[in-house]
Image: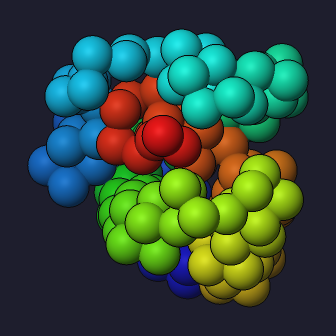
Amino acid sequence: MLGLAKEIETKQEVKGIIDSLQFYFKQIAPDGIAGLEAKLNHAGRGGEIYIAYEKKELFVKLLDKYSLYESAQKIFAYLLAKVEHEFNFAVHPQVTYCDVLQINQLISAKIVEPIVAECGVGPLDVNHNVAMGMVYWLAEQCFVRWH
């Protein structure tokens, strides 16, 4: 985070997006269910569509605001990889065995709380809503799913 603060202070910007972050911008739906709304509806979570879009947009705005800084790109790539990994290896395997509340608690314990603890202060100031926005953004990009 100190590197990012220095880059911001000195206005040290980059032109492109690093490969590890660019990886998450491709949208491939291997199950044929593309988009956040379709994924939530398919998983019986249609009631959270509005708030999911709101939280996803919080993350998108943060990503856009800091995307000109290489350190921020590295941090975002790291966080997105962490979210994807934890969701796919700790949360998704439980989807058929747990109800919505239990899945939400897993997401909070395995993804949201650790990210807020790690990045909740500093230039990015990632709060719970932004961390959850990462999950929803990855769902829209087809990297995580609730079904």
Is 113 or 45 nearer to us in this picture? 45
Is residue 93 visible from the viewing direction of this image? yes
Image coordinates of residue 139 in percent, x first then y, are: 48, 36
Question: How many marks do you count on the picture?
Answer: 0
Image coordinates of residue 96 in percent, x first then y, are: 53, 56
Q: How is the image coloured?
A: rainbow
Image coordinates of residue 70 in percent, x first then y, are: 34, 57
Is 56 or 68 nearer to us in this picture? 56
Residue at the left extreme, as displayed? 19
Question: Left or right: 82 with respect to 146?
Answer: left
Quarter-of-image position of residue 53 = top right
Question: Left or right: 83 with respect to 52?
Answer: left
Residue at the front extreme, as displayed? 97
Quarter-of-image position of residue 27 = top left
Q: Is residue 28 above or below residue 125?
A: above
Residue at 73% x, 31% y is 45
Image coordinates of residue 1 in percent, x first then y, are: 56, 78
Q: Is residue 65 above or below residue 130?
A: above
Residue at 19% x, 28% y is 30
Is residue 112 visible from the viewing direction of this image? no
Residue at 27% x, 16% y is 32
Residue at 14% x, 49% y is 19
